[in-house]
Amino acid sequence: MCGIIGYTTKKDNAVNVTISGLKNLEYRGYDSSGIAFTTDRVNIIKSKGKIANLEEKLTQQDISSCCAIAHTRWATHGEPSEMNAHPHRVGSVTLVHNGIIENYSQLKEELISKGYEFKTQTDTEVATAYIDYCYKQTKDKLQAIIQACSKFRGSYAFNIIFDDELQTIYATRKDSPLVIGYSHEGNFAASDVSAILNYTKQYSLIDEGEFVKINKDVVTFYNTKLQIVQKEIKTATWDATQYQKNGYDHFMLKEIFEQPDVIQNIYNRYYDDCSYNDIDFTKFDKIHIVACGSAMHASLVGKYLLQTYAKIPVMVEIASEYRYAEELITPSTLLIVVSQSGETADTLAALRLAKEKGAYVVGIVNAVGSTISREVDKCIYTYAGPEIAVATTKGYTSQVAVLSTLAINAMKQNGLLDAENEKTLKNDLLNIKEKLEDVLKNKEKYLDIAKSIYNHEDLFFIGRGIDSSICMEGSLKLKEISYMHSESYSAGELKHGTISLIENGTPVIAIATNEELFEKTVSNVKETKARGAFSIFITTSAHQDYNFDEFADKVVIVPNTTEFTQAILVVTALQLIAYETAKLRKCDIDKPRNLAKSVTVE
Ligand code: AGP
């Protein structure tokens, strides 16, 4: 996902401040970057690769400027290149963009017929040209932006500079995130608050269809009728240090080790404010949980808990597929959307579809003030704090934790939680921190396993029931950061075809935490061992005295808990195995190739 930031100031340090803020957006994933800064004209510098390459170019010129806009590009239209990098400039308009203009081809044809020529393959250059075209017609900047945006289909967050107003930034958004930041020395427009936290904690959110004129000392919000809109000024509750590694080698490792506090805080909050309690599950005739990637894997754990313990049928669907299930969505549907970033386009599209159908939509979101958090009927924040590493860890486990509290809530409503069970659960939830810390201590074991698998190119995760859902997250973690191909498979299903891929030395990670399914999973592991697999067996302390010699080459034991928290402990071990494996394979752990932290394009 691209990142944008603009800054206009009373001083002449706009370039340094903008680049500094842009670095806080690196976590979103990118392949090139660029900046436009104004002097008596617009100066544009762009480079492929890391921001350091852009900085190198900037050292070769005078960068005193009071106004700048900058961009990190995650390529969607046109290869990663200096030419395709933003900012783009057409006529008297210079612009940076996060999102996709889906109808750019037809707009490009229209502009070509009006004499415009294009240098790049990007949709953004077309958007820039269209605003320039409208400005030539209207002679009014805001009118031009409104008119052009009315033609755009797709998503956008724009920062725009016009040649005849070199100290002002115009901004607007649709579907892509954008916040306005306020400081004593100047004002910002950026993709998220992380970009401005080095300079201010004061920010406002831009709603869909609003337009902003940003000067160094005044910021004005307009609606499409050019009426001035008053906006609340919010204060960020976190600070820039949370965007530092604080001594860890990688953000991912830091965020893995934050999990004991993050998860304990969620459970403590559950027992204190019970804000989750006002969802009346009995009011709905069906429950859908919709998300992408790891958030979908967390949703599967939530489904298991709601079905197994609250006896409530649940459908989990990948967000990009949910639109094909729209016939199932009615005003009696409860849709739960799960999203760490709160900006994932597929998930946003799913919630908008459900709301059109009259469904009640609950969001489980980490990023406070994000688009999804503002569009759902009820938002339950995970309060995990900023997650910088592209591969989610605390984002996933905090989603599982919140979903587990919803399941407990549903059990109570359905009269399925007796005093004894509630006491057991409360003890489990309120003491999870030390058990999670025990899992984190096992570094040597995870490194030993990593050494035994890192030089393989194919690996399998197998499990049954809730363990099958945990396998999906373990497999994604390994793939994302170590680039090893792995596949998660229901343990009982492997023998129906895929076991043909098991050959001598093929690593198989088996997860067996569910008591009733334990022996069946052991049998499935033996089937793979019989074909030469190298087996890594993960179970709980309830089975620590089991004889593993016959079928397990490596064994990982995690503390035994109820199934409401068990996935959190097991996935933490899998996160660390993936982390150590990626380190051995010398991968870019925090910013894996091709990936973005939040995918704001469909
Ligand atoms: C997880 O490691 C990935 N980064 C990805 O699967 C992510 O979970 C997915 O894109 C959903 O993101 P969200 O939670 O921000 O909506």
Image (cartoon, grey):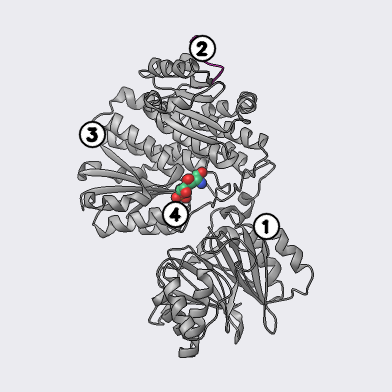
Q: Front-most of 324 and 288? A: 324
Question: Could you classify mark 4 by the number of other residues whose Cα lies within 10 Å: few (under 14), some (14-19), or many (20 or more)?
Answer: many
Contact? badges 4 and 2 (CB < 8 Å)? no
Q: Nearer the viewer, mark 4 or mark 1?
A: 1
**Mark 3 residue type:** Asn
Numbered range of the magenta stretch:
545-558
Q: Is residue 120 visible?
A: yes
**Mark 4 residue type:** Thr
- Percent from the top left, x then y, of residue 32? 63, 61
Q: Which residue is mark 1?
A: 50
Q: Does the numbered disc 4 mark a residue whose Cβ is under 8 Å from ligand 1?
A: yes
* Inter-mark Cα distance, 4 to 1: 24 Å
- Percent from the top left, x then y, of residue 427? 42, 26
Q: Earlier in the sequence, mark 4 or mark 1?
A: 1
Q: Which residue is mark 4?
A: 344
Q: Residue at x 53, y 38 (%)?
A: 477
Q: Main secondary structure of the magenta part?
A: loop
Q: Residue at x 28, y 55 (%)?
A: 354
Q: Which residue is mark 3?
A: 414
Q: Quadrant of the C terminus?
A: bottom left
Q: Earlier in the sequence, mark 3 or mark 1?
A: 1
Q: Nearer the viewer, mark 3 or mark 1?
A: 1
* Inter-mark Cα distance, 3 to 1: 54 Å
* Inter-mark Cα distance, 2 to 3: 40 Å
Q: Which residue is mark 2?
A: 548
* Inter-mark Cα distance, 4 to 2: 42 Å
Question: Could you classify mark 2 by the number of other residues whose Cα lies within 10 Å: few (under 14), some (14-19), or many (20 or more)?
Answer: some
